[in-house]
Image (spheres, grey):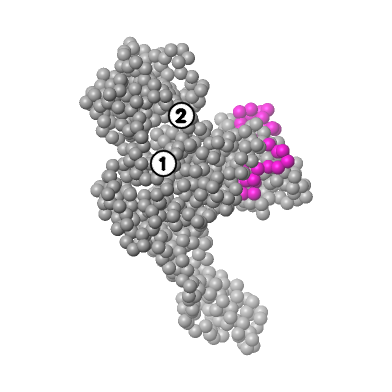
Amino acid sequence: MKKTIWLALFAGLLVLAGCAGGTTEPPMEDPASDVSTDVSTDAPETRAPADPEAELPLAADGTSGYVIVRGANAPEKEVLAAEEFRKYFALVTGAELPVVTDDTPETAQEIVVGKTNREKDGEYDRAALGRDGFTIRTDGEKLWIVGGEDNGTLYAVYGFLEDYLGCRFFTPEIEKIPEMKTVSLKIAGDTQTAPFNVRTLYYTTALGNGTFAAKRKVNNSDGSISAPGVGLHSLPVLAGTGTESGGPEPCLTDENTFETVMAALRRALDSKPEANTVSVSQGDVGEEACCHCDNCMAEVEKYGWSGHYLLFVNRVAEALKADYPNVRVNTLAYNNTCEPPKGGVVAADNVLVQICTLGCRFHAFTECTEEGDFASILRGWGSACSYISIWDYTVNFRGFAAPWPNWTAIWGNMALFADNNVGTYMAQGPYTGIAGEFMDLRAYLLSLLMWEPHMTEEEYYAHMDDFLAFVYGPGWQHIRDFIDYTVKVMEDEHTTRTGFHVDELYETDPETGICTASKVLTLEQVRDYQSVDWSLYYEAGRTYVLHPFLKYGYAYFDSALAEAETDEQKWNIERARLQLDYMKSFWLYAKKTPSIDNCVKVYGDNLKNLMNQGMITAEEADALRPEFRKYITERVKEEYREFNLELIQNMVSHNAAHFIEGVANLDSREPTEWNLDGMPSHMGGGDRWY
């Protein structure tokens, strides 16, 4: 955020309840006893209250002589802005202010919201403010709240409520509204402009909720990229060679591919004339699915994979320009096309390159190159295109509910994006309705960073503590200590955007399990394998032991729960604690995991022995092996399903709504609608356990 504040007499210092440098060491014995309980129950403030000695008395002892003025023909968003100011000002001060239009006689004490005839010509440069920027200032007895032509005035109202009255819009359901019966202030100038043109919070918290998105200054609340007729990973679909998620990529040096893609795009655009963006991007695949013909590989050698694709996309964009001058072509820099192009290839002026972040997820890209040097990749793209879009992965995609301590990374990365031609930023998180780990907190912090990417680390953690204190109550510091502990646990770990399975946080028992059942099968048992009790051979070969992460984690949450004062605080703590229940379920599951491979090995050894004894022919053995593998796989998978469904039902039985919100109702969904390990999409890991 470009922010200029010439004078705000009421402004004070940040009150910091914690900072990034003070991570808590994991307690060795009793975590609860190591956590300080001498903590204020009030949320840390990020601004001091208004100065009562300042010159503009907006309210005194719950009354006010001010009126709110908006334009008589104000657009819908400015009408809403005036009403929101009236609503929240009354909640804070108790003073009910009338809303009038600018065709009423002017008075001295006015709060002017949006564009009105009260302005002098050229007094506010809305072009400089952009779509979403705004200015807040006092002048004489008037308070001016003026915004850009799109969302600016609405953002200005919410910004005033947050920055000057101390309101907080944490979630769609949780808002902090302080009581402040007297408000007096003077602001010579507070001008803020958006650092990113488009700010998308691809979280359930904001998706489809335009009101909350506006409160968080997020201007894309549906997470979509307009791509008529096709999805984002579009090239295989447009060319007819595959699907978005699979199938071979088309040959980009084949003229038939170009003609087929152009025809498909023209059909799509003609059917949706309002579209301003189309997608021409590789499928959700990597290099292995791309064309490797001599012509394509010659381009790859010269320009790199991204240059090879960009040459094709540029050609498409140029062909569309004449008939669709307002349409931009979106293309992904993804997997093998993430590296910037070579050989001087640059994006056409109507091509938008959307770079999908890669690299270590637990450390800022400028600080860590263990999983790829994404900072250098981003800077390289700055030379290849004038406008960059970022698709950022901000959660564990192997399990939305699993702990994912990337708190320092999301703070450290936003300034990098703002400083390197990024015009569009999207944070992709839990978007399917599942209550992800600290989903609301992470969404709140990301929205703040999208507006102010250069905030200091101290400011960032003060915002975190502000949220924790209000949402979780007097024991909030224990949850902050848990967050610090998770960061500490993973400080030396590095992982890519796809994350890791939660079983990787567990330790393996050093003693390999030994099957105690007799491994000798008779000829009749080998031929009639369905009569054998194969559970005797379900030895997985290893067992997991509970990681201290869970032991300490439960202690932190138990301490926070013991200090909660309201049912809402308890509910919020229990909901956040489900990340540990989720992990524990996998630990229990891993300890009981039956091993298909062990059963197959036992069966195969017996086949081999019987063949060596001449009791069974090689032909019969070759026929029995695949039959048995198919049988044991289906049998074990069914047992997996029954066990895991029961496990998860038990895990969420105390309040299923905490964990699953509108997506997966365990009581009503058929098992066939679940992944075979019993976890709905993005809660588990597909066939990880087989």
> Which residue is located at x 42 percent, y 26 percent?
5
Figure label count:
2
Is residue 343 rendered magenta in the image?
yes
Q: At numbered mark 1, what does the secondary structure look like: helix, strand or loop? A: helix
Q: Give the percent coordinates (x, y) of residue 47.
A: 35, 34
Q: Quadrant of residue 455?
A: top left
Q: Is residue 619 left or right of residue 587?
A: right
- Badge number at residue 207: none
Is residue 335 rendered magenta in the image?
yes
> Which residue is located at x 36 percent, y 12 percent?
103
- Badge number at residue 458: 1
Amino acid at the residue labelled 1: Glu
Q: Is residue 476 left or right of residue 548?
A: left
Q: Which residues are magenta?
A: 317-346
Q: At numbered mark 2, what does the secondary structure look like: helix, strand or loop? A: strand
The residue wearing badge 2 is 3
